[in-house]
Amino acid sequence: MKTFEKILLTNMDRPGYTGSLSDYEEAGGYKALKTVLGNVPPTDIIEMVKKSGLRGRGGAGFPTGVKWGFIPKDHPGPRYLCCNADESEPGTFKDRQLMERDPHQVLEGIAISCYAIGAQTAYIYIRGEFRLAAKILERAIVEACQAGHLGSDIYGSGVTVHVYVHAGAGAYICGEETALLESLEGKRGKPRTKPPFPATHGLYQKPTVVNNVETLANVPHIVNRGAEWFASIGAPPKSTGTRVFCLSGHVKRPGNYELPVNATFRDLIYELGGGMRSDKPLKAFIPGGASAPFLTPDHVDVQMDFESVALAGSMSGSGGITVMEEGTSMVWAALRLMEFFYHESCGKCTPCREGSSWIVQILQRILNKQGRPEDLRTLTEICENIGGRTVCAFGDAEIAPVQSTLKYWRNEYEALIEEAEALKGSRKEIPVLSLA
Amino acid sequence: MIFDKHQDTIDDILSRYPVRRSAILPLLNLAQKEEGYVSQAAMREIAGILDLTPPQVFETATFYTMLNLKPIGTFHIQVCRSLMCALVGADPLIEWLRKQLGIGVGQTTGDKLFTLSTVECLGSCGTGPMMQINDDYYERLTEEKVGRILRDLRESGDCSLKSGPFMVPERIVSP
Amino acid sequence: MSNTPNMLTITIDGIRTQVPEGTLVIEAARQVGVMVPHFCYHPKLAPDANCRMCLVEIEKIPKLQTSCSTRVADGMVVRSSVPNVENARKWVLQLLLGNHPLDCPVCDQGGRCDLQDFSHEYTPTVSRFKELKRVFPKQYLGPVIETQMNRCVSCMRCVRYCDEVIDAQALAADGRGTLTQITHWAGNELECDMCGGCIQICPVGAITSRLSMYDYRPWMLKRTETICSYCGDGCQITVQRKNDQLIEVNSALGAGRNNGDLCARGYFGYHAAVHPDRVRHPLVRQADGSFAEVTWEEALDRVARELTAMKATHGADAIGGLITARCTNEDLYVFQKFMRVVIGTNQIDSSARYGYINGVRALRRVQGTHRWTVRYEDVARADGIMLVGTNLNESNPITALHVKRAVKHAGAQLITLESLLPFRSTVSNVTTLARHHLTVKSGRFAAAILGLLKAVVESDLVHEDIAREAPEFVQAIREKVAGVSWKAIQAQSGLPQAEVEAAARTYAQAGRAVVLVGREVLRSLGGEGMVTNLLDLLILTGHLRRDGSGLGCLAEANNEQGAVEMGAVAEYFPGPADLHDEESQRTLTRAWGQAVPGGASASLPELLSRAKTGAIKSLFIVGENPVESLPGDADVTAALDALEFLVCQDLFLTETAKRAHVVFPACSAMEKDGTFTNTEGHVQPVRQSIEPLGESLPDWEMFSALSVLMDQPIEYGEVKEIFKEIRGVIPGYGLLGPASTPPKAKENTVAQYVKTGFKEDIDRRYALDPLSAAPEGSMTLRLVQSLYHSGKYSTRAKGLMEIEGEGLLHVNSREARRLGIEEGQAVRLSNDRGQASVSVKLNDRVPDAVAWFPEHFDQSVRALFSLKGPAPAEVGVDPQTHVPVWKTTHVTMTK
Ligand SMILES: Cc1cc2nc3c(=O)[nH]c(=O)nc-3n(C[C@H](O)[C@H](O)[C@H](O)COP(=O)(O)O)c2cc1C
Ligand code: SF4
Ligand code: FES
């Protein structure tokens, strides 16, 4: 079996590691923060992160250092950092592990990032369901404040960083950065139209950076070991470092695995994941969370970095890989994801709001052998009119499962519709809607 | 008044934000913890605390699916039905739970002990099928395990099978 | 600082144009005649870009962009009618129609619905949506609004309007995704400003009025643009009728001083005009005391004969006239001319006497013009706005919208001195927006204003120009305010020194600042002095002369401003000009072909007292109802009963009209042409929108007919001729339309005032009256203006009566708890004059130890009020201005 160096999961791999402050400090924690505060100018840290090639682990893969660079240099008022811990993308569960098992690693990343962008306040927007993670983080914040790693005038450097945990209450869309800001402002979590971008008009209309948990957790390591070291891992220059990939579905050993980004899906599924659950052949997999188009067994040797997956026609998104074995109905799989998107659409934009319910109904009908010959054309056109027509990227995400399954497994749709045609007249059409 | 005894908590919450309205979700969450659901009285009170109108609190509350605007059972069983859990047996589990509890999805048992809901992905796809009961996650469920969970909750109000900090895969095979 | 915006060049569908920087693409397109279809965009609202209907192609941007949220860039090339864009629109419509019930045949919006129109233009005739539609039950949002959420397109215009414009935040989106509905909250009955704005702004038929439900198809309606006859804001309304039936009232975006906004009275109050109780025929009292319907000839002849005889036997001054300020300028003008020329008396007054006159007198004295020196546009642009005793949301809701807009969208600093608390609820409350809110004890505004003056003088906020130009004036005030202690100010007004100083500082330092003064100042004893003191404040801070700064007095009734300007008040000829002003005497004599009478004038209290003593033997009362506008101990009935002959001209048989010998049926404003002058001084056209009811006539026609019968004809072929005459008499009057520039303070009047004029009454104005303390354990009971009513006229409007159909006693929840009472419970009020039993409504904007009762329903509590005292000392007739003040009393409240 190949070996891979880990970064983020190293501490917690040690037997007996609890994630407490003393465990973290013993493992070299908060060294990076101590090194930079007051010693390294913030702009140098931004430069360092730029050079490391670190890209966002939340889904869009935007270069983190570049994003930080958009914060206006001499803005007088407050700025904010929001740690995106909403982790709601189906198939993704890495942030939960990072927060629950090694909270201080995240906090140290937050503190350094705040220093780099000049923010004195950071909010960790955590999905409401993660009660345990929220509790662990709250406790860690108290510990870190008591030890002087957070709070006012850290280590006497004059730098202040307050970190607060803000729990959501059940809305996938609040992972979208502007919806997150709306939600944090106490409103319905509806995405904002951009421009203006959060870098200038973010939380409370102040300059704001939103970064994923995993993205931020990488920062102390980059500071400790240098941008060059980080940039040498993975598929430089564009995709660097490791990622914690979340493996789920029909595999023997589902779970989180940290791999350099240039590892292949085969490495993950067959080496680490132990291969297919019941030794049925692989039929399909989702390479980057529910928003990523499905891929086929032809793609298992693709590298998991952003570019390679994009070239293969999908995206590496949030790093959630879901595996499906032969025998799984792709129409059903698409419907399950579509039902998720229907349930989670915030309702702001017409195409997304109305389109998702229409698609769900058509898929339910097809699966129930009540499909009609014109359904596939309708599905295609609805998808075409959601993609690129909405305020946020949710619209592009929700059509991925339908478009990609139609692309690779159109025959399954057609077979179901043919069955329906054959059954026509032999039974009454019953509505199958279950939009609750 | 629901919040009277939580004045310290409220002050702490309010101190975290430069704009009062931001405290709306923390206060709604607190109200639900206190009463099991978010009552109209609670929304009115939150509006008063945050200098908002009740409709502003209401419209925020109705956006978020974790907030119940009606009373529910003591234990809110929320089973994930999203694709990843469904691939590993969520549907039969939901069916089984319905039979065990004798209620449909969205209903509450006669003794007001359990409410059964299905929810979308809870971020524990590698350990499905799974469910959340009140604040706790229960993962890698089997009928047998769920049977024990229901029994324990009925008897003692708690169950040791709930998940601790994320531990999966337990032993990562590193050569 | 340059105010000229940067102009950018943009090409839209091949048309090149220049627009200011910041313009939205959709607006730029409209300017060149390209209408981009849209639902969620509305010029009054911040872009939300949710409907995605307005997508356009912009060169160099790969994806289609929403033109409602994209601002133009220089050189931008936009295409709105290429296939890609049209296809996108088609799909947005197709998606919207998917869940739409397509119930156009029974939808009140059918025929003027954006969804219907765009569908007609863009969608195929066959629907591809063959699934189940989501179904919401129909809801009633309170007594006058219906919602059909199946028709909703989720554009959120209603919710956004309620929040951004009205600031009520009464509407909420309930739920998420396609299951989102618009509602109040959690099934509660809607409580809000009831402005009808959500109905008007809904682009489809999702929110409709219950008053006109299923009564019409829009194309059956005939429209008339006219002016609302409730408050002094003077909103332009569109009256819609189907044949003879009055169907609805709404207002057009971009029109009038209200720019499409209305309040509950304007939107739901239109049925007052067609109330079944209207007097439809001339009535003459019979020997047995009953009224008989007679012909116009008979009625007019009777009145002409009586008045001629009266004049011949007792002289012209045995006759007096009283007219309501709800009449048109033309009615008011002809009435005063009739009284002065045909009768030959100056004994006329109008309802401007109830308080508006206080402001007019002070403004004329200090600044030389009685009009506002600012307009709504200046309010919207002001850096600072100060409201003094206005109760603005209730008295002048549209002025309030301009204030809200200035504060919320332009960052104006708001200072409110009001006797109400800044409690936030789903009924908007402008004081919640204040940077400085000072809760003034009711009736103690004089002390609060002195506090402001003291703060300005003692905190070095006096403007250097005035300090240099009129040191004596400044010094005199300095000495005066030194004699009033902060302790005394706080004891009376309830305001601590620090708060007053902070507010005064904000006001003084604001670049452009507007002060608006309302009924709590105008309708109180010493009101004229208080307005004068406020003008001193403007002078001291340099705001009197500054462009965009000024002071405005708020007219509560629609044409109080006009009543004063038409000369329908005791102290003025048309103009208004002083009765002794020789120049105007000459002008009028020339215009009327007859010398103006030289006799004494008479204010309302004088008319009544002269009637009581028998000096006046006949009154001609037009649309006024003093019996119910004054408390019992004002002896109005005694005065009227002493008359030999009383003529009333009215819409209804009021308590006053019931005592008349002859009653003329008058037309409402909906049934006649003319003009009203709004509170800011805009003269606006009133147009007949329905046929006169029964035999009713416009007021002026009756005066004119009488004049002919009395052999001194004042004749006009049509209303326009009257207006022409008015313009001859008042030069420049009525540059109709909203654009006229406001007058400026007259330099020499101001100079004269600061030199010597101020001295005349400075001692009185700068002294704190010792006020009698309220009896131990009592509450102050005040009759207040409600947002849903205006005078008593609106209580005839069925829509408004659905909203507020009875008088409830408003007390705050602390008082209620203290007294152990709950909402809806009856309480007993009593004092040394009488008692009453009323039901309680909780209202947390009412201050402690105070109860409010809507004056429109005052019948049930009138017994508790007095014009004569003893307590409180804040009631009585103002010795200077004769304003009768009586709407405050002290009561004990028991369960
Ligand atoms: C519909 C939607 C859901 C998203 N959910 C998440 C999420 O749960 N967690 C997350 O970190 N990013 C999520 N994102 C991505 C964020 O918008 C944003 O790009 C990210 O937080 C930026 O952080 P990064 O640059 O560190 O990845 C989501 C985006 C969309 C469009
Ligand atoms: S009710 Fe009307 S205004 Fe409100 S969201 Fe729906 S369509 Fe828009
Ligand atoms: S009008 Fe532009 S998105 Fe609605």
Image: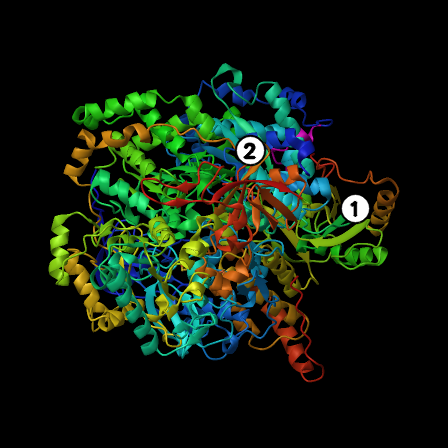
Verify whether residue A4 appears in magenta: yes
User: In the rendered structure, which amino acid carries the disc numbered 2?
Assistant: Pro
Count of numbered circles on the image: 2
Above or below residue A3? Residue A281 is below
Q: Tell me the SS state at disc 1.
A: loop
Q: Quadrant of residue C705?
A: bottom left
Q: Quadrant of residue A419?
A: bottom right
What percent of the width, then of the height, locates residue C60?
31, 55
Residue A184 tag number: none
Mark 2 nearby-residue class (10 Å; few <14, some 14–19, many ≥20):
some
Q: Nearer the viewer, mark 2 or mark 1?
A: 2
Q: Chain of mark 1?
A: B
User: In the rendered structure, which amino acid carries the disc numbered 1?
Assistant: Thr
Q: Is mark 1 within 8 Å of ligand 1?
A: no
Say whether residue C306 is left or right of residue B113: left
Tell me the residue that label 1 is attached to.
B74
Mark 1 nearby-residue class (10 Å; few <14, some 14–19, many ≥20):
some
Q: Tell me the SS state at disc 2.
A: loop
Q: Quadrant of residue C492?
A: top left
Q: Nearer the viewer, residue C463 or C24?
A: C463
What percent of the width, then of the height, locates residue B3?
66, 36
Residue C375, can we see it? yes
Tell me the residue that label 2 is attached to.
C775
What residue do we see at 67% from left, 73% from top? A431
Quarter holding the C terminus of chain C? top right
Q: Main secondary structure of the magenta part?
A: loop
Magenta region: which residues? Answer: A1-14
What percent of the width, then of the height, locates residue C709?
24, 73
Say whether residue C565 is left or right of residue C174: left
